[in-house]
Image (cartoon, helix red, strand yellow):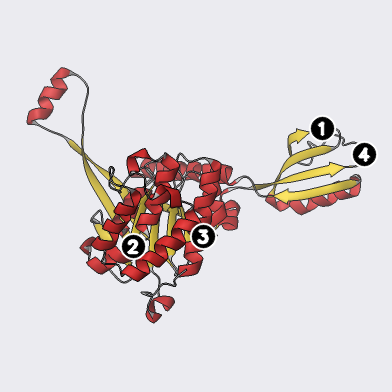
């Protein structure tokens, strides 16, 4: 597979994405129910200001894959659209590969790709191969480079038999794979992936994850990934950014996320004999005569594990962080509590 020819020497030592205090506010009309309110809105329309992104700052290094997590309405897609040039920021600034995204310069558009799992960018009635050729012409991609990349990515994504089919005849999973293929025609160095595996079966999700990891490793491309499937995040990203109501709650590695937002770990223990009562050691999640799952506070993990080893003929013992889904849910709950507290202080 070709290496990233456009990646200059200076880019190796500089962040590919650099965001500082980025903000976006939407003016949203207020619509109330009822005929009287509808008639009144024709002459006196009211609006409210929605702060979608509130001073977000972070950076991405070449080759780095970062999970961008948050509930619906947190500001994830708005941030990605600003970084790809689709939305103009209302404050702060962002640089992607040294470009200001909102200027939408031709070279910037060639080197950045936004792939949205619930959007179609290909020509609906054209065969996939014709859409790829159209994309090649728009981005003025060298013919030889185009053919080499198309062959390599077609094989990796296993879409060879799809190239002659019109896009409208493809399944959701097939369409997602060719969308990714088309987005990579100009060989971008930054990928913004917004729910790339949404609605896909497990096998298709796995293939797309493997492809994204290989592309980033082979080309040095940076990837910012949003997904509600935590398997996408844990398989691809060592670092995660958690955003809630437009504010960043956390930016660090996955292990640090668990340390920050959960106060416990899980001990799974199996014994050769019979287990007695264990409630005094922690919260019993599950227990039978020879196996138990305990939820134990982090500062007591070593003590409880030693106690189990001393009191029983332990055949297996493992200490695990809580499931990432539980950690994320806890992070969102903390974000809600912080926002409620700040709102209470602002309006005593």
Of pointers 4 and 1, the one earlier in the residue sequence: 4
Q: Distance between the Cα atoms at labels 1 and 2?
A: 54 Å
Of pointers 4 and 2, the one earlier in the residue sequence: 2
| Spot occupied by residue 9 in the image (x, y as percentages of width and height) | 40, 81
Secondary structure under the numbered disc 4 in the rendered image: loop
Q: Distance between the Cα atoms at labels 4 and 1?
A: 11 Å
Q: Of the residues tagged 1 and 2, which is closer to the observer?
A: 2
The residue closer to the viewer here, 40 or 218, is: 218
Q: Distance between the Cα atoms at labels 2 and 3?
A: 17 Å
Secondary structure under the numbered disc 2 in the rendered image: strand
Of pointers 3 and 1, the one earlier in the residue sequence: 3
The residue closer to the viewer here, 323 or 217, is: 217
Secondary structure under the numbered disc 3 in the rendered image: helix
Q: Distance between the Cα atoms at labels 4 and 2?
A: 60 Å
Of pointers 4 and 3, the one earlier in the residue sequence: 3
User: Which residue in the structure is indicated by mark 3?
Assistant: 213
> Looking at the image, which residue sits at the far top?
35
Characterize the local packing of mark 3: few (<14), some (14-19) or many (20 or more) Cα atoms within 10 angstroms.
some
- Where residue 168 sits, quadrant-wise, is top left
User: Which residue in the structure is indicated by mark 1?
Assistant: 288
Characterize the local packing of mark 1: few (<14), some (14-19) or many (20 or more) Cα atoms within 10 angstroms.
few
Q: Of the residues tagged 3 and 1, which is closer to the observer?
A: 3
State whether residue 170 is above or below residue 107. Answer: above
Of pointers 1 and 2, the one earlier in the residue sequence: 2
In the picture, the quarter occupied by the C terminus is: top left
**Image position of 84 (left or right of 275):** left
User: Which residue in the structure is indicated by mark 2?
Assistant: 112
| Spot occupied by residue 259 in the image (x, y as percentages of width and height) | 60, 54
């Amino acid at each position: 597979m070709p290496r990233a020819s456009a990646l200059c020497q200076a880019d190796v030592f500089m962040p590919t994405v650099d965001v500082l205090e980025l903000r976006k506010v939407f003016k949203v009309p207020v619509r109330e129910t009822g005929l009287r309110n509808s008639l009144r809105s024709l002459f006196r329309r009211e609006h409210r200001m929605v702060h979608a992104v509130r001073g977000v700052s972070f950076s991405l290094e070449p080759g780095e894959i970062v999970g961008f997590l948050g509930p619906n309405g947190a500001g994830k897609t708005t941030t990605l659209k600003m970084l790809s040039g689709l939305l103009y920021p209302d404050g702060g600034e962002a640089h992607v590969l040294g470009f200001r995204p909102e200027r939408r310069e031709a070279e910037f558009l060639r080197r950045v790709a936004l792939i949205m799992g619930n959007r179609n960018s290909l020509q609906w009635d054209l065969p996939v191969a014709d859409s790829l050729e159209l994309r090649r012409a728009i981005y003025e991609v060298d013919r030889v480079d185009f053919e080499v990349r198309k062959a390599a990515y077609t094989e990796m994504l296993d879409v060879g038999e799809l190239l002659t089919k019109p896009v409208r005849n493809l399944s959701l999973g097939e369409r997602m794979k060719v969308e990714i293929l088309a987005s990579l025609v100009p060989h971008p160095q930054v990928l913004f992936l917004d729910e790339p595996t949404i609605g896909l079966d497990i096998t298709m999700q796995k293939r797309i994850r493997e492809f994204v990891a290989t592309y980033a490793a082979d080309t040095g491309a940076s990837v910012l990934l949003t997904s509600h499937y935590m398997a996408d995040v844990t398989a691809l990203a060592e670092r995660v950014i958690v955003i809630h109501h437009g504010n960043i709650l956390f930016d660090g590695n996955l292990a640090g996320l668990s340390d920050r937002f959960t106060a416990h770990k899980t001990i799974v223990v199996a014994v050769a004999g019979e287990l007695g009562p264990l409630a005094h050691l922690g919260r019993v999640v599950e227990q039978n005569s020879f196996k138990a799952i305990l939820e134990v506070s982090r500062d007591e993990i070593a003590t409880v594990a030693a106690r189990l080893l001393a009191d029983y003929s332990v055949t297996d013992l493992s200490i695990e962080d809580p499931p990432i889904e539980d950690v994320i849910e806890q992070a969102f709950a903390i974000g809600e509590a912080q926002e409620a507290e700040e709102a209470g202080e602002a309006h005593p």
